[in-house]
Image (cartoon, rainbow, N blue to C red):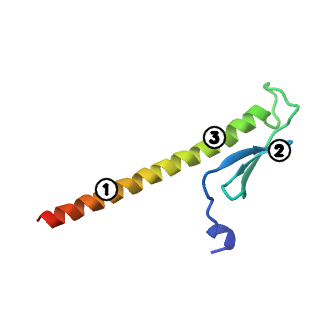
Amino acid sequence: MSESSRYRMEAPWRVVEKPNHFAVLDASGVALAHIAFDPNRRLDLTPGQMTRSEALSVAQGMVADQDKKLAILRISEMIAANQYELSSVSRKSH
Protein backbone atom coordinates (compact mmCIF):
# COMPACT_ATOMS: atom_id res chain seq x y z
CA MET A 1 0.00 0.00 0.00
CA SER A 2 1.47 3.34 -0.99
CA GLU A 3 1.72 6.26 1.41
CA SER A 4 -0.95 8.20 -0.47
CA SER A 5 -3.45 5.33 -0.35
CA ARG A 6 -3.08 5.11 3.44
CA TYR A 7 -3.91 8.79 3.88
CA ARG A 8 -7.31 9.44 5.46
CA MET A 9 -9.22 12.47 4.18
CA GLU A 10 -10.12 14.01 7.52
CA ALA A 11 -13.46 15.71 7.89
CA PRO A 12 -14.73 18.32 7.80
CA TRP A 13 -13.93 19.34 4.27
CA ARG A 14 -14.09 22.97 3.20
CA VAL A 15 -13.93 25.05 0.02
CA VAL A 16 -11.28 27.75 -0.39
CA GLU A 17 -11.37 30.19 -3.29
CA LYS A 18 -8.17 30.90 -5.22
CA PRO A 19 -7.73 33.34 -8.14
CA ASN A 20 -8.78 30.85 -10.85
CA HIS A 21 -9.97 27.75 -8.98
CA PHE A 22 -11.63 26.43 -5.86
CA ALA A 23 -9.68 24.05 -3.66
CA VAL A 24 -11.47 21.41 -1.61
CA LEU A 25 -9.40 20.93 1.55
CA ASP A 26 -9.69 18.41 4.35
CA ALA A 27 -9.52 19.31 8.05
CA SER A 28 -5.72 19.24 8.05
CA GLY A 29 -5.47 21.53 5.02
CA VAL A 30 -4.56 18.88 2.43
CA ALA A 31 -5.96 19.74 -1.00
CA LEU A 32 -8.26 16.97 -2.19
CA ALA A 33 -9.42 18.65 -5.40
CA HIS A 34 -8.93 21.77 -7.51
CA ILE A 35 -11.87 22.91 -9.61
CA ALA A 36 -10.74 25.44 -12.20
CA PHE A 37 -12.86 28.26 -13.59
CA ASP A 38 -12.42 31.18 -15.95
CA PRO A 39 -12.92 34.33 -13.85
CA ASN A 40 -13.90 36.29 -16.99
CA ARG A 41 -16.32 33.75 -18.47
CA ARG A 42 -20.00 34.52 -18.44
CA LEU A 43 -22.69 31.86 -18.38
CA ASP A 44 -23.65 31.09 -21.96
CA LEU A 45 -23.83 28.07 -24.25
CA THR A 46 -20.28 28.19 -25.61
CA PRO A 47 -17.96 25.39 -24.52
CA GLY A 48 -14.99 26.17 -22.33
CA GLN A 49 -13.92 26.32 -18.73
CA MET A 50 -16.59 26.57 -16.06
CA THR A 51 -17.81 29.86 -14.74
CA ARG A 52 -17.00 30.78 -11.14
CA SER A 53 -20.52 29.85 -10.00
CA GLU A 54 -20.41 26.49 -11.81
CA ALA A 55 -17.06 25.62 -10.23
CA LEU A 56 -18.28 26.71 -6.79
CA SER A 57 -21.35 24.51 -7.18
CA VAL A 58 -19.15 21.49 -8.00
CA ALA A 59 -16.85 22.14 -5.03
CA GLN A 60 -19.75 22.65 -2.61
CA GLY A 61 -21.37 19.48 -3.94
CA MET A 62 -18.25 17.50 -3.11
CA VAL A 63 -18.29 18.81 0.46
CA ALA A 64 -22.03 18.15 0.83
CA ASP A 65 -21.61 14.58 -0.45
CA GLN A 66 -18.87 13.96 2.10
CA ASP A 67 -21.05 15.40 4.88
CA LYS A 68 -23.88 13.03 3.88
CA LYS A 69 -21.53 10.03 3.86
CA LEU A 70 -20.26 10.93 7.34
CA ALA A 71 -23.81 11.29 8.66
CA ILE A 72 -24.77 7.88 7.26
CA LEU A 73 -21.64 6.33 8.79
CA ARG A 74 -22.41 7.85 12.21
CA ILE A 75 -26.01 6.63 12.09
CA SER A 76 -24.84 3.15 11.07
CA GLU A 77 -22.42 3.08 14.00
CA MET A 78 -25.18 4.16 16.40
CA ILE A 79 -27.50 1.44 15.09
CA ALA A 80 -24.78 -1.19 15.46
CA ALA A 81 -24.04 -0.06 19.02
CA ASN A 82 -27.75 -0.14 19.92
CA GLN A 83 -28.15 -3.60 18.39
CA TYR A 84 -25.17 -4.85 20.38
CA GLU A 85 -26.60 -3.37 23.58
CA LEU A 86 -30.03 -4.90 22.91
CA SER A 87 -28.55 -8.34 22.20
CA SER A 88 -26.49 -8.09 25.38
CA VAL A 89 -29.60 -7.25 27.44
CA SER A 90 -31.51 -10.06 25.75
CA ARG A 91 -28.80 -12.63 26.61
CA LYS A 92 -28.82 -11.52 30.26
CA SER A 93 -32.58 -11.93 30.57
CA HIS A 94 -32.57 -15.51 29.23
Q: Residue 43, located in which quarter of the rendered image?
A: top right
Give the residue displayed 68% in from the left and 47% down from the top: 14
- Indicate left or right for 69 with 79 as reference: right
Q: Earlier in the sequence, mark 1 or mark 2?
A: 2
The Cα atoms of the two marked residues, 2 and 3, are separated by 17 Å
Residue type at the position of mark 2? Lys
- Indicate left or right for 70 with 26 as reference: left
Q: Position of residue 32 (x, y in %)?
A: 70, 55
Q: Which residue is mark 2?
A: 18
Q: Residue 18, located in which quarter of the rendered image?
A: top right
Residue type at the position of mark 1? Asn
Marks 2 and 3 in Cβ contact (< 8 Å): no
Give the residue displayed 13% in from the left and 63% down from the top: 93
Label 2 vs label 3, nearer the camera: 2
Q: Earlier in the sequence, mark 2 or mark 3?
A: 2
Q: Position of residue 60 (x, y in %)?
A: 66, 40
Q: Is residue 79 above or below residue 38?
A: below
Label 1 vs label 2, nearer the camera: 1
Residue type at the position of mark 3? Gly
- In this rendering, the count of numbered labels is 3
Q: Which residue is mark 3?
A: 61
State the mark number for residue 82: 1
